[in-house]
Image (tube, grey):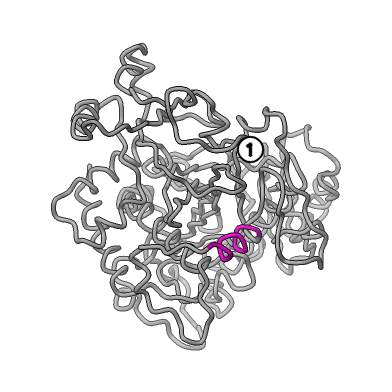
Amino acid sequence: MPTVDSTDTRECHKCIVVSCSQTRYHVVRAAAVSLGYYVEDEGRNDIPTNYHNIQLQPEAQRLSNKMQGLCRNYEASTSPQIIWLDKSVLPARVAALSCRHRINHFPGMHVIARKATLFRRLMRIRRSHELSHRLRRTLCSFPWSFAAATETPLLERFIAEMGQQSQFFILKPNKGCQGKGIMVTPEPLHVLERMPRDHRDEYLVQLYITPPLCIDRKKFDLRIYVLITSIVPGCVPRHGRRTCASPKPKEDDVYGSLNGLQLFVHSEGLVRICAEEFAAPDRTNCDQASVHLTNYAINKLVDGFSIGTVPAAGSNDCGIGEGNKRDFAFLCKYINDLSIASQAEDDEVEFSSNAVVTQWDRVLYRIDRCIMLTILSGLEELRREFVGSGASRGARSDGRNCFELLGFDIMLTEELLPVLMEVNHSPSLFCESDFDFATKHQVVMDVFRVLEPHLPSLEQCDDASYAAYQATTAACADDSSGTGFRRISPSRASSGVEWCEEDRQIFDEMLRHAVKLR
């Protein structure tokens, strides 16, 4: 649970520089400063002196002083090890990176973060006649969806097969955000017909999933922060030799198709609650956005909307229990207090007999599985783009040039089953409240902490020194140790419950089906 004194300021023993000149998010700067990193804001004159009680502007002079005599050829545009951008990157940008660079996007991430592309691929897999029973059932986490540009005939057939069943649909613009352009309707075909063709083609049509789990009789969803640090099997770059205390086993033998996929989920997130009480959609209420849509930008305009107060450090661990934006500590207690008999597949998963297994533990397992299947649906495309950029060869053979912080929006049904709404490749890091800052500051600091073991100090970032560093024991440390992230790939053991064999099989199966997509 985030608290008001969660800054955790410390002095880093390395010289790590973070380029923030192309991001609007001051919480990224604050996280870097809190960890003792240096912030490069070349050309920016709009940086506040103080952001949520963290001093930002003195960093420029502090960095200048440090660079004198430390790195004689320092260049503000190319030297920083970590580069944080708000926009996506092309393969050419990644191709130009050196071994020391870490940029916060993978090329080709639209395959997962663009709604129409993601759900078109997921639905093609879900419609396959060759799925195992377990995978078919698990894919119910992805609501039936249709890209208006290419799949209107499939939508027509789906509606016809529903017969007299009264179903509602959500229409979402493919590149939309903040709830703009979203509509709830029982007649998606009629709505699409009234749109101009170029406007219509930008929409995704999704089946409205009901009944949702509610809090205070209101619909809610979760913003879950997911970190990817690697998508390909890496090896120590040339000029170096691995010197870990004990040799690593070959991941190919241990993890199979998950080899090289380093994936983490943060324990902190946002519970976003609608401003008005939920009612099943009908023709009289389907235009009431604050009943059906959880978007913050929509609900904050409604009278009575509020954000809970961040508890002081050392207070009880029950979380933020009031307002329309709450934390996962509250949700954990809320779900554990429910008496719901879920029929989920993971009820057969063998949790450790030494641990007390809660409903929240099971919900997290299902959420992690949903996240895994989402990433696996586009993994082969991501790998193709990444390898094609040259980011896994020569001095960069460790495959660590890119990382990505994704925002997964997931709702829960009354049976505590996760339903994926969308994935954001650049989740908003604006902080309009102390709670926003406490959560997002912690998440971004932990992103940097996961990256740090594989980053040598700036003065040791030439190819030979970098390769030598990657061969050290320090660079072999557990990435997520001491952070709020739990690793879910290639192993989930550090999360308390390893993937069961049946789920490993559906991961392999999902990847096989995804490879066939074009």
Please, is residue 384 above or below residue 518 in the view? below
Q: Nearer the viewer, residue 4 or 482?
A: 4
The reply, left or right, for residue 174 in relation to residue 275 is left
The residue drawn where x is 58% and y is 62% is 451
Horizontal and vertical percent for residue 266?
A: 57, 60
The residue drawn where x is 21% and y is 61% is 133
- Residue 307's image quarter? top right
Horizontal and vertical percent for residue 384?
A: 31, 50
**Residue position for label 1:** 22
Question: Which part of the image, by quadrant, shows the N terminus?
Answer: bottom right
Is 334 part of what is drawn in magenta? yes
Main secondary structure along the magenta-highlighted residues: helix
The residue drawn where x is 37% and y is 61% is 232
The reply, left or right, for residue 4 in relation to residue 440 is right
* Magenta extent: 330-338
Question: Which part of the image, by quadrant, shows the C terminus?
Answer: top left
Q: Nearer the viewer, residue 344 or 352?
A: 344
